Amino acid sequence: MNDPSARPHDHRRNFLEMTLAGMAGGALLATPGDIAHASGQSAMSPIKGLFPPGAPAAASGYSPGIAATGTRVVLVSGQGPDDVKADIETQLRQTFNRIGLVLKAGGASFRNVVMIRGYFVHLSRDLPVYRKVRKDYLSEPYPASTAVGVTELAIEGLEVEIEAIAIA
C-alpha cells in the first residue's frame, strides 16, 4: 500500500485473491508460484487444484483446495430442486440446473466454481448419488467441497440444498 500510483481496488483485489487462496487451503502469504508448485499446474491457470501431502481427497470429484484468480466473485445461495417429490438424482440435477442459472446471471459457469457445499437431510443415502451427479456438472480441477448432514432445511420437504462460490 506504499505505492501512491496503485489504485485502491488493486490492493483490495490482491487481498481478496490471497484470502481466497488461504480459505481454499493455501497459506495467506503464498505466492502464485508457491500455489502453482503445490498443485503441479502452471501459474497462468486461473483455477488450480491444491493437493498438498497430508490433505487427501476423501473421494473423487473434489479437490482438497483450490487457488483461483479472477475479477469477479459469484456467490450462489443455497439452491434446491423444483420438485421435492422426485427421486434424489432428479432433485440433484434440478438443483445444479438452478445453480447454473445463477452462475450464468453472474457471468460465470460451472467451470468457474471453486467451492461447493451440499446440505443433506439423508446424507448416507444421498451422498453417493451426489458424488456421481456433480461430476456431470463440474470438471477438473474439481472445486473444494463439503457435504453436511442436517436434520432439516429451511423449506418444508426440502432434502437437499447446495451453495457455490465461483471466481470468474
Image (cartoon, helix red, strand yellow):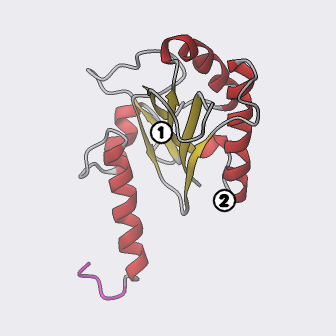
Quarter of the figure with residue 16: bottom left
Say which of 22 and 83 sits in front: 83
Q: Report x, y in % for residue 115.
A: 49, 40
Q: CA distance from mark 2 to mark 1?
A: 21 Å
> Where does the C terminus fall, quadrant-wise?
bottom right
Residue at the disc numbered 2 = 106
Which residue is rendered at x = 42% and y = 31% of the image? 40
Q: Report x, y in % for residue 85.
A: 74, 24
Quarter of the figure with residue 7: bottom left
Q: Residues within 10 Å of mark 2 (few under 14, many from 20)?
A: some
Residue type marked 1:
Lys
State left or right for residue 85 relative to residue 56: right
Q: Determine which of the numbered discs, if any, sits on residue 164 in the image.
A: none
In the image as oriented, which residue stretches furthest toward the front?
156
Quarter of the figure with residue 51: top left
Q: Are marks 2 and 1 in contact (CB under 8 Å)?
A: no
Say which of 38 and 141 sits in front: 141
Q: Over which residues does the magenta segment extend?
A: 1-5
Q: What is the secondary structure assignment of the residue under circle 1?
A: strand
Q: Report x, y in % for residue 55.
A: 30, 23
**Mark earlier in primary sequence (2, 1):** 1
Which residue is rendered at x = 35% and y = 19% of the image? 56
Residue type marked 2:
Gly
State left or right for residue 168 relative to residue 83: left
Residue at the disc numbered 1 = 48
Which residue is rendered at x = 67% and y = 22% of the image? 133
Say which of 127 and 104 sits in front: 127
